[in-house]
Amino acid sequence: MLSSSFYVAAKFGNKFFDRFRETSYYWSSDKSFLLMQYLARFVAVRQRFAQQRQSVGSIIKKYSATSQVHLSNNIEAIVDTLFQDGYYQGLKLSEGKVQAFLDYAFTHPCYANRDRRGDPIYLTPELIAACPKMPYRVASYIHHQENSSLIKQLARDPQLLAIAEAYLGRAPVYHKSELIWSFPHQQSSANCFTHFFHSDINDYRNIKFFFYLTDVDETSGPHHYIEGSHVNRPLIGQLRAPSPSAKTNRRLAKLYGKDAIKTVTGPAGYGFIGDPYSLHRGSDTAARPRLFLQIEFIMSQYRCWYYKRN
């Protein structure tokens, strides 16, 4: 009993000092980021920024250039859905644009489990078609794709910028992108952080654009989200955010009901938009590898980012 108590106390102490070092880092690097990290977990604070909503018509006039993205509805209806549900499904990239991303993915290195310290991996269409089980769950192009003209063009797309500005209430700040493969895996990734429902607290308001670059059905790693959870969140859930765990998953399914949990599937090129404060999660792919692109806009440019994160 004594050794068990000692172990618990030591574990708590380590977490305390880790948190202290992390907070000290934010304090010295960017106090505004430290403040945001705590305040942006509360719905009331985030809703304060929603009250700064601008006229969609005036925003659209600012971004009148030709878009690379087909929308299934007008921008005003899309933004209304985002405010109500936290997500919108119905974007589309052309076959040519999808192929351009695949060509990029097959001619540039990616890194297992988002770890740039590992050896670079060069994938081929033949390897992807063979659909082997990999020793790693994901492989990301880390930050290399930021230099790609494909990413730069999408990050400046007039329709995406108009939607982002209408939702954020101010001119969007490009934050980051990620181009990432998910693979059938030799072991279950049930303990993966991103495979439990969680929130991303990256700013007081932020928005992400997602695109499937391979076909995605329910067996090939679909994205899941809980509709309306960006505004409907118990106080304890706000305090604990992001708090991902299997226990949290079961509690959230019971709290919101199965009808609120949405699964996003679609062909290559299919896109959707999300407020990443909404409860969301990834899933394992079993049928085939999945290539996924996400582009994020925030409200402010901070001088630091999360402690010890890439």
Image (tube, rainbow, N blue to C red):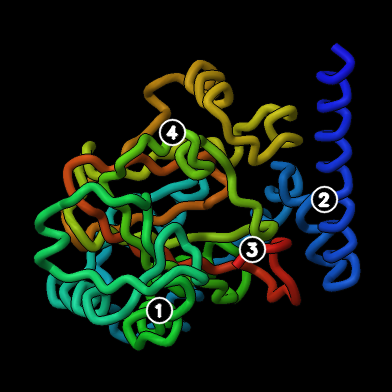
What residue would you read off at disc 3?
309
Q: Earlier in the sequence, mark 1 or mark 4?
A: 1
Above or below, comparing residue 237 to residue 310 in the picture: above
Above or below, comparing residue 9 to residue 29 in the picture: above
Mark 1 or 2: the one toward you: 2
Mark 1 or 3: the one toward you: 3
Q: Residues within 10 Å of mark 4 (few under 14, many from 20)?
A: few
Alpha carbon distance from label 1 to label 2? 31 Å
Q: Secondary structure at mark 4?
A: loop
Amino acid type of disc 4? Ala
Amino acid type of disc 3? Arg
Quarter of the N terminus within the rendering: top right
Q: Are marks 2 and 3 in contact (CB under 8 Å)?
A: no
Alpha carbon distance from label 1 to label 3? 18 Å
Report the side of 77 relative to 122 (left or right).
right
Alpha carbon distance from label 2 to label 4? 25 Å
Q: Nearer the viewer, residue 130 or 213?
A: 130
Alpha carbon distance from label 4 to label 3? 22 Å
What residue would you read off at disc 2?
18
